Image (cartoon, grey):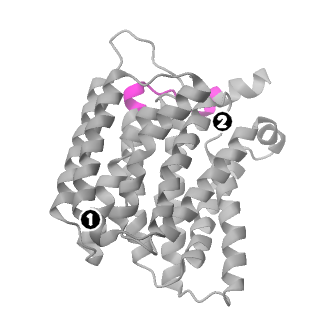
């Protein structure tokens, strides 16, 4: 066991709090293109989820195969129950996100995700006994003001009872970030592999029950690209960075997705982004930037490694 832990320490990078925060900010930017990718295809939600899962699984299998070539037992010995639960949560959030987009705009679905810092703070307190810092609480309060501004301009036109299923996403994400942070030994790709498998199984069953696949090569390529480049790659970086950034803070930093996603669909596919959506997004972004700058560890503090 000590040999495995030592090997993991060499394989995973050592990050400072600021580096981890910047990685999570970039992760949110990568995620923000997910809504645009779905709006760019002409297939159903479940068929798209299948190809998205295929892309995610391809990255996970490739990286795990390279990292653990010739020593599969090392990987299986390090998998914890929390990895599996986190992977199932990740798969479920992916399904909810894509299905919700069939009933509501990108802006509306993502507005609900701004509850993630609150749910992350709750689960971190419940499971890890972590209390969010004063700066995180202040930034979360500011971001909620931005949410109110965004909702004020879009709730009437975007409201859909089915779209409200997206409110389960921030609950799942809060628990997901807490589980990732709670694990003592983690490979960033394990939850991705579990999530990909769940998407592939549920996706293929749903598509076959609905009459079979009907995607063009372009639609399939966009789905695979979304699952690999826009999801698996940034999410694996997030899983590593999450080890040095508290869950309540990381779910606030990743709100770059909420701010940018409505902008992309407005620019490229003409999905309306109201002035209040833009103003609210600017308020949220200001809160995210502020908490990033104010949470830089004091000079002389030892850098935190991926082992905590």
> Can see residue 67?
no
User: Which residue is at a point 42% across and 52% down the rendered structure image?
Assistant: 113
The residue labelled by disc 2 is 186
Q: Is residue 186 left or right of residue 221?
A: right
The residue labelled by disc 1 is 154
The verdict on residue 16 being magenta is yes
Quadrant of res 83? top right
* Relative height, residue 186 to residue 265 (above, below): above
Q: Earlier in the sequence, mark 1 or mark 2?
A: 1
User: Which residue is at a point 35% across and 55% down the rendered structure image?
Assistant: 111
Q: At which x and y percent is residue 4?
A: 75, 28
Q: Secondary structure at mark 2?
A: loop
Chain part drawn in magenta? 9-20
Q: Secondary structure at mark 1?
A: helix
Q: At which x and y percent is residue 299?
A: 33, 11
Quadrant of res 152? bottom left
Q: Is residue 214 left or right of residue 276?
A: right
The verdict on residue 282 being magenta is no
Taking the view exactly as shown, the residue that stands out farthest to the top is 300
* Relative height, residue 47 to residue 164 (above, below): below
Placement of the C terminus among the 4 image quadrants: top right
Q: At which x and y percent is residue 146?
A: 24, 47
User: Which residue is at a point 28% across and 42% down the rendered structure image?
Assistant: 143
Disc number lying in front (1 or 2): 1
Q: Nearer the viewer, residue 184 or 108?
A: 108
């Amino acid at each position: 066991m000590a040999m495995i832990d030592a090997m993991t320490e060499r394989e995973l990078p050592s990050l400072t709090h600021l580096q981890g925060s910047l990685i999570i900010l970039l992760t949110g930017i990568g995620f923000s293109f997910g809504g645009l990718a779905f709006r760019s295809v002409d297939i159903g939600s479940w068929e798209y989820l299948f190809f998205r899962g295929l892309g995610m699984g391809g990255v996970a299998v490739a990286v795990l195969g390279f990292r653990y070539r010739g020593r599969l037992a090392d990987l299986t010995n390090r998998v914890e129950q929390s990895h599996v639960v986190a992977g199932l949560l990740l798969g479920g959030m992916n399904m909810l996100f894509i299905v919700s987009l069939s009933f509501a705009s990108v802006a509306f679905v993502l507005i609900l995700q701004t509850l993630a810092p609150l749910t992350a703070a709750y689960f971190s307190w419940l499971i890890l006994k972590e209390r969010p810092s004063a700066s995180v609480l202040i930034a979360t309060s500011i971001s909620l003001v931005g949410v109110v501004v965004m909702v004020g301009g879009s709730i009437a036109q975007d409201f859909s009872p089915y779209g409200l299923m997206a409110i389960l996403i921030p609950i799942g994400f809060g628990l997901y970030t807490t589980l990732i942070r709670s694990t003592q030994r983690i490979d960033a790709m394990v939850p991705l592999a579990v999530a990909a498998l769940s998407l592939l199984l549920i996706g293929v069953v749903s598509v076959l029950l609905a009459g079979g696949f009907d995607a063009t090569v372009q639609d399939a390529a966009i789905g695979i690209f979304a699952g690999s480049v826009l999801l698996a790659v940034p999410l694996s970086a997030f899983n590593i960075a999450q080890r040095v950034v508290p869950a309540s803070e990381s779910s606030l930093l990743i709100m770059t997705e909420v701010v940018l996603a409505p902008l992309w669909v407005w620019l490229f596919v003409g999905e309306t982004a109201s002035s209040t959506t833009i103003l609210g997004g600017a308020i949220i972004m200001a809160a995210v930037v502020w908490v990033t700058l104010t949470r830089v560890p004091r000079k002389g503090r030892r850098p935190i490694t991926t082992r905590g």
